[in-house]
Image (cartoon, rainbow, N blue to C red):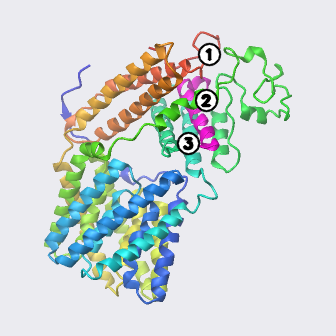
């Protein structure tokens, strides 16, 4: 079916952009981490009477905001690279500030740095908060008077604070060594349960299905982020994610209550639930819930007879779908091991598709800074950072971020006007206000960006008072003007630099899904295919489906693009889900349709 050729302009939301969402499950982790990372260096410098050096230590401390969703082995590497990236941008900014005081040159350098930081963070998927923190640090440093002799000392302070932030980020590892993997697995199980509850079709079911596949894909990304030999705990978590995939393939046979109970058990620090054979109604968790004795003896609650489970428990023959043997752990996870051995794509190959976004960032940040300078602003980097914070996957999301930024900053300057008299009383009061704003920003930003900006704005204004007193009225006026300039000019640049590759990205994503589906169907139909080949084909198709949905959602918000071929996308997703179900059955995780009269396959027949 050829895509429509008509182009149309899409309406931009306003009220919807300000709607509050649910807070993140781990909102307190970055909030507490940034306070723990910022407080010791800041208080130490305060006792030494050098509050003017706090902005440099804060640059390293803010790295504690990153990688909270990564396993600790991967988090150690990601945090190290974030700290090095922060130091690199800060070094360029300090050297530039030492060599010239020409504001136009400094704005240009800041815009180029912002574009590079956004492209690299998007390509490596570092975030949140992605490039915004790095851009804020480097842009602010550009407009602080420097000499070449001072730069090494300032960089050393930032590096020392960065090492402390690294230690803060890794501190929970001894207590909960698999905390991130457990959370990702629990989210996948809850998403699969939500889809099973809404699997009656229609828009609600389709949205829940997309969310569930995205959660499962995110769980696999977390579990596969560490490529060394998996531990026993991680293998148990991988089996749970496999079970979530099984229930996505046949939601009518899923048990949402059981999935949610597994998710609750996984979130803690206790024993990982045993899933048993997905082809059975009985499993390790139900075995415990039904009160089986340690030796396996016990009765089913419906009185149908005894279970026969792993470890000596018994299961009546009528409950077996096929041969009654439990799926071997080696067969379940062999595909995971094969995928873990595959090297990731090189960075340069991921940067190409991000060129339009990098151009948007460079142009928007530069123009915002130039306009701010033309209006006589003393801190044009505020406008530059505002523009840099806007750019999202498409124009609609960029507009929403612009609305959120403006509203949050306007409310934030009012908060600063109320807090400033208290912060100016004493250096300790100033540091405590900065810490409170850091905590509030990270605690609230997960509900909506504008709510977090209410605390980010006074934080940025308070930092300007660290070297010395600044008139509150001038700071408020300058911040409001630069916010409006940055939001307006940045959005105009986003509209001017359209993502003309958007339509082609959808076509490529559709082609990728088709090819992955053909490969998975071919492998599933081959009786001689190995478990590793089957699992690799299934995982590749699942990743392609998730990427198609993400690409379609991003392109749907672009202006003046060809209308999105929604029907083609939906048909491709449906065909892919049927093929995924077929590969799951081929692995023996589900009974074949027709082997029992009680089996209902809601996704359709296999191709």
Rounded to the nearest whole Å, what is the CA distance between mark 3 and mark 2? 14 Å
Rounded to the nearest whole Å, what is the CA distance between mark 2 and mark 1? 27 Å
User: Where is residue 407, by image quadrant?
Assistant: bottom left
Q: Is residue 12 visible?
A: no
Q: Which residue is mark 1?
A: 599
User: Where is residue 306, by image quadrant?
Assistant: top right
**Chief secondary structure of the magenta portion:** helix
Residue 250 is one of the magenta-drawn residues: yes
User: Where is residue 363, by image quadrant?
Assistant: bottom left
Q: Residue at x 17, y 48 (%)?
A: 497
What span is colored magenta in the figure? 230-254
As helix, strand or loop, the secondary structure at mark 3 comes to: loop
Counting residues from the start of the chain, the first of labels 3 and 2 encountered is 3
586 left or right, relative to 49: right
Residue 330 is marked as: 2
Residue 411, given in percent of the width and then of the height, sits at: 38, 68
Residue 21, given in percent of the width and then of the height, sits at: 47, 51
Q: Which residue is mark 3?
A: 229
As helix, strand or loop, the secondary structure at mark 2 comes to: helix
141 left or right, relative to 594: left
Which one is closest to the eye, mark 2 or mark 1?
Answer: 2
286 left or right, relative to 97: right
Q: Residue at x 50, y 61 (%)?
A: 30
Q: Residues within 10 Å of mark 3 (few under 14, many from 20)?
A: few
Counting residues from the start of the chain, the first of labels 2 and 1 encountered is 2
Q: Residues within 10 Å of mark 1 (few under 14, many from 20)?
A: some
């Amino acid at each position: 079916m050829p895509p429509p050729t008509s182009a149309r302009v899409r309406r931009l939301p306003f009220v919807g952009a300000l709607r509050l969402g649910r807070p993140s499950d781990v909102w307190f982790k970055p909030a507490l981490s940034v306070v723990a990372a910022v407080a010791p260096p800041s208080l130490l410098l305060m006792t030494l009477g050098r509050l003017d050096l706090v902005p440099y230590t804060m640059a390293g401390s803010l790295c504690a905001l990153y990688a909270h969703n990564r396993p600790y082995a991967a988090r150690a590497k990601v945090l190290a690279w974030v700290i090095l990236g922060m130091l690199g941008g800060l070094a360029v900014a300090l050297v530039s500030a030492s060599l010239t005081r020409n504001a136009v040159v400094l704005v240009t350098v800041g815009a180029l740095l912002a574009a590079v930081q956004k492209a690299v963070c998007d390509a490596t998927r570092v975030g949140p908060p992605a490039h915004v923190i790095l851009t804020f640090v480097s842009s602010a440093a550009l407009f602080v008077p420097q000499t070449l002799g001072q730069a090494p000392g300032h960089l050393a302070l930032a590096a020392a604070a960065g090492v402390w932030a690294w230690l803060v980020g890794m501190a929970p590892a001894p207590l909960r060594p698999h905390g991130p993997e457990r959370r990702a697995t629990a989210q996948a199980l809850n998403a699969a349960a939500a889809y099973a509850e809404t699997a009656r079709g229609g828009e609600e079911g389709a949205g829940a299905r997309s969310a569930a596949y995205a959660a499962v894909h995110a769980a696999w990304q977390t579990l596969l982020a560490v490529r060394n030999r998996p531990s026993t705990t991680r293998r148990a978590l991988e089996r749970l994610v496999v079970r979530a995939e099984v229930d996505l393939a046949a939601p009518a046979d899923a048990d949402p209550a059981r999935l949610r109970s597994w998710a609750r058990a996984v979130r803690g620090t206790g024993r990982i639930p045993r899933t048993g054979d997905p082809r059975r109604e009985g499993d390790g968790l139900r075995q415990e819930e039904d009160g089986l004795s340690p030796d396996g003896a016990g009765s089913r609650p419906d009185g149908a007879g005894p279970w026969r489970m792993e470890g000596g428990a018994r299961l009546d023959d009528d409950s077996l779908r096929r041969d009654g043997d439990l799926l071997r752990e080696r067969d379940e996870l062999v595909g995971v091991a094969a995928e873990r051995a595959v090297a990731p794509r090189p960075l340069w190959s991921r940067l190409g598709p991000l060129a339009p976004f990098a151009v948007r960032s460079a142009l928007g940040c530069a123009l915002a800074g130039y306009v701010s300078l033309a209006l006589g602003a003393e801190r044009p980097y505020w406008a530059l950072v505002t523009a840099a914070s806007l750019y999202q996957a498409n124009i609609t999301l960029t507009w929403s971020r612009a609305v959120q930024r403006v509203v949050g900053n306007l409310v934030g300057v009012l908060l600063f006007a109320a807090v400033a008299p208290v912060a100016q009383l004493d250096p300790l009061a100033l540091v405590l206000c900065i810490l409170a704003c850091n905590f509030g920003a990270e605690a609230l930003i997960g509900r909506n960006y504008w709510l977090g900006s209410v605390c980010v704005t006074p934080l940025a204004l308070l930092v300007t008072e660290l070297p010395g007193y600044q008139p509150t009225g001038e700071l408020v006026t300058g911040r409001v003007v630069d916010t409006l300039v940055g939001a307006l000019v940045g959005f105009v640049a986003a509209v001017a630099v359209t993502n003309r590759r958007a339509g082609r990205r959808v076509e490529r994503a559709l082609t990728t899904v088709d090819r992955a589906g053909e490969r998975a169907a071919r492998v599933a139909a081959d009786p001689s295919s190995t478990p590793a080949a089957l699992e690799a084909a299934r995982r590749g198709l699942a990743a392609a489906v998730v990427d198609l949905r993400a690409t379609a959602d991003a392109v749907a918000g672009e202006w003046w693009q060809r209308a999105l071929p929604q029907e083609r996308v939906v048909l491709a997703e449906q065909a892919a889900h049927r093929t995924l179900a077929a590969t799951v059955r081929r692995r023996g995780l589900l009974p074949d349709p027709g082997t029992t009269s009680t089996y209902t396959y809601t996704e359709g027949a296999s191709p």
